[in-house]
Image (cartoon, coloured by chain):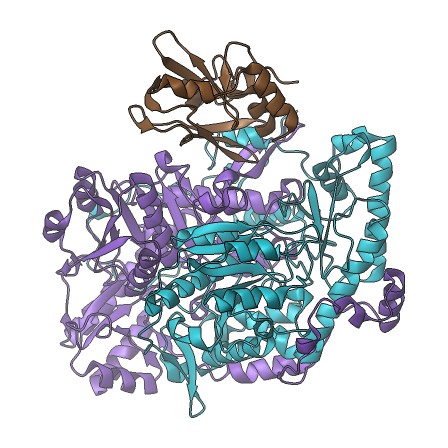
Amino acid sequence: MSFLPNSDDDIRSMCNEIGVNSVEDLFVDIPSTVKNPDIQLPSPLSEQEAMHSLLRIANTNKRVCSLVGGGIYHHYVPAVVDHLSSRSEFYTAYTPYQPEVSQGTLAAIFEFQTYMCRLTGMDIANASMYDGATALAEAVLMAVRTTRKNNVLCSAAVHPHYRQVLATYAWASDISLQIVPYKNGATDYNELSHIINDTVACVVVQSPNFFGVIEDIEKVAHIAHEHKALCIATFTEAMSLGLLKSPGECGADIACGEGQSFGNYPANGGPLLGILACKKEFMRTIPGRLIGKTVDEDGRECYVMTLQTREQHIRRERATSNICTNEGLCALRATIYLGLVGNRLVEIARTNHTAASYCLEQLVNLGYERVFDASFFNEFVIKINNAKDVQNKLMDNGFALGIPLETYYPELSDCLLVTATECTTKDDIDTLVKLLQTI
Amino acid sequence: MSNIPENLKYTKTHEWIDVQDDYTGICGITDHAQEMLTDIVFVELPEVGIEVKSGEQVAVVESVKAVSDVYAPVSGRIVEVNKTLEDSPDLLNSDPYGKGWIFKIDIKDKHELDELMDAAQYAEHVASGE
Amino acid sequence: MVSTMQTIFSLHKQGRNKYTVPQFGAENYDPIPQHLCRGELNLADVSEVDVVRHYRKLSSLNFGVDNGMYPLGSCTMKYNPKINDAVASLPQFTQQHPATIEELSQGSLHIMYSLQEMLCAITGMKQFTLMPAAGAHGELTSVMIIKKYFETKGEKRNIILIPDSAHGTNPASVAMCGFTVKEIPSNSDGDVDIDALRAAMDDNVAAMMLTCPNTLGLFDRNIMTIADILHSNGALFYCDGANLNAIVGKVRPADLGFDIMHVNLHKTFSTPHGGGGPGSGPIGVVEKLTPFMPVPVIAKKDNQFYLDYERPQSIGRVHSYYGNFLVMLRAYTYILMLGASGLKQVAEHAVVNANYLRVKLQKHFNLPYTRICMHEFVINDEGMPNGITTNEIAKRLLDYGFHAPTVYFPLIVHGAMMIEPTETEHRDTLDAFVDTMIAIKNEANTNPEVLKAAPHTTPVRKVDAVLAARKPVLKWEE
């Protein structure tokens, strides 16, 4: 298959005009000892053959009824989202460096920024980061830059992958990272009060946390501020923002996390949608792109990338971050999704909680242990004896029941993180219960 | 043709200093500098009370297309900063030697002033295109 | 005349939103305590038809590759094959959760593993990771690997050399890892100044980062000498693979002496730019750097694919999961269709197209480097009549239905305009572009005012960027 519109004749005649005898002459600067190597790739295919081949591979992915979350969530993506985001003026466009021909992208991202501010309770949100984990890492770098302090405290109840990414970034930039233990499924706030001191740049808490538990962000913010540290509230389930008190309302300085739940597919973990939002005093240290409102020379309201001098293409080694390409199309999808569901988002969020509560009640009735008593949104931890065996048997019957926690938290053996969303029906759960009764 | 007042002293990096009788100096960036930067959108002011060395970066000036460091013309302590620049960074463009002053410094060693350029020398420096 | 560009928020009206949420079918068990809940949500309530018309209208204000030629230098705005998107929409892929057990995700693992192998074959590198979500992310990950390599060796090196023509993400990535940037000048031919490089070389230098071909669109003729200088001092050689489209299939970066590189799937491998992402910036390394690659590594044993976490010297995770999978899927499909011969032709056609434009435009515009270029070349506004600037030329091109090339980059050429046609434009389009540029040059002579006031026919005219920076308004308010 080829997407080269020029014919051999075209190429020959163009070479003539250029003044070379052959195409090879244009590659004269490549050392001859290594030019034109024999590259081992499968033989080329037509589009039809390629699709056939991809379908065969696709079908080795098996679908089951999934009560799996833990950072990525199954939510319903309305048809309008695919339909509008696949308009090629949106997805084949580049970064909006020429605002006069990019108002579509710019206006949509301005709307995205607005939605993120409203949902997180913050003053400023950027145009997106790669994912929730790198958004957290950049939020921490931002806090370190702003406070000029080098110590970071992070709750053990923050998603393990996020903590790992944070650890990598912290090691790279020579930042000291300390983990605050959890207790009863939430951050041990007492322990936090004891550990924290005035050398701490920021405290990171996740809510709902990795165990699904809703944390007391207000308390963490209070403790952090007493020591002139920033409070960073992170989240993996953006849907929770539709129902729970926002990080901004709770006194957090920076809110960051994963927006995949809004209009984007689980898609084996990518592309995702990092969200980063903050109070207005951090406007000049927030990394990433910012879209601002302005006017054109005829007085028309329009949008433009602004405060770009903080970014890599101008500030270079003094930039707030190296980020260039972000997750523009995913942000567009989230924006369209939020435009479509509007304030019904509350209902969707509530349905998530209802489904999870019903699921938990049924599992407890079967005799399994609810591990943490605290309030949760749409995920909870349940203890099942010989959990691995049970999971395998369920898998054979088309059910994926949660994520085992042992690899991340060795003390939580036989514990599973179970998730339900608005896509989990009552029938699904009742069928699961019947299955469990037979195991 | 940029404006270069006679009574001021200048650095190679396009800062000016107006030395007062009590050996404090009012400092800012020159007309030439603001012209090169074009519309200034933000000024990051230094912290009051800090000690700086001659040539040390003390402030940052941002325009739409560039970011420029502002350096201390002499060593000393920053005693005052021009807070009006926070809301009106455009003063640096419209009145770089007057309302667009950036900071006041308590000069540590008056001999450092001898190393600075006078108006004529600075005019030459600008003309040479450095 | 002030007209308001509508946002979705200005379309809000009570009662319009009829979105239906399915009922769960059971009472709200164990409701969340009120004090943990938010007050009223204030999103926009509109009808579905409003949403569709609003975003359809917004899309019409955009210019994408499907609208016309997009000669943005260093961005490789080639045609995005639609088959890629069809594959990336298959529910077997989109609905798959990344925490699904390996036995049930062999399809996704197969794609990732195979793409890694393909990129190794294309670049000559020993191992690839697909985890970085963008080129800059790949650069950052690479600098982390370089850091870890020297840390493990017990060598304290804290300088990274970068040419003065480098893309801004290079020094930014370096600084994020605590290294200091040392700039190496380019000589008048556009190659790295070898003497300056030798002078800058010492035991403190960890690596050099070089875009290949460079950001002037030129293939550095001393590339193997540069590699030698670095290697004989124990330093590493990093390739910024943004410009791979010029040499894909023609030479493997590992064969030129590079130890580590990133590629941009959304440039060379045809995945769409999305208006600012998602992209994907996989990185490849030579054997000695493989222990430091991020986890997990996609591996294969006995015909089964699995995730390898047993990597004690790894720099750790750099993404919450495996990277931008749906982007990888598109690149995989593309490489599968083209094969080695197809990729080679991509580079050949891209380079022919660029040189064709170069020789046609050099009669009318200043060309700082006149030698054979690769897939892109730089002109500037030197000698333009009536003081017309690169920016003004760029804005006028918009009126003629072309997207502007990259402007004011690289910084070493004053008033640079970097033009990259890519291989998916045919000769007629290139001729039309040349004719347009000549017409603009004529306008510069005879009617400079129309250039200074450009663009005229775009949805909005020149925007006030100063106002946006002085008084930032970053969200919609009533």
Give me the residue at 89% from left, 71% from top: A9
- Residues A294 and A355: in front is A294
Q: Which chain is cyan?
A: C
Q: Position of residue B21 (x, y in %)?
A: 37, 7
Name the residue nearer the viewer: C475 or C266.
Answer: C266
Image quarter of residue C271: bottom right
- In this picture, residue A242 sits left or right of residue C86: left
Can residue C134 be spotted in the picture?
no
Q: In which image quadrant can residue C219 be found? A: bottom right
Horizontal and vertical percent for residue C159? 44, 55
Does C360 sit left or right of C86 as displayed?
right
Residue B98: give x, y in percent of width and height. Answer: 49, 12
Task: Check the picture and name the quadrant holding the C terminus of chain A.
Answer: bottom left
Instruction: Indicate whether C464 appears above or below B119.
Output: below
- Chain identifier, colour purple: A
In the image, taking residue C251 as reference, residue A59 lies left or right, namely left
The answer to whether residue C94 shows anywhere in this view is: yes
Residue at point 37% right, 76% down? C100
Q: Which chain is brown?
A: B
Question: Residue at the location (84% across, 55% down)?
Answer: C359
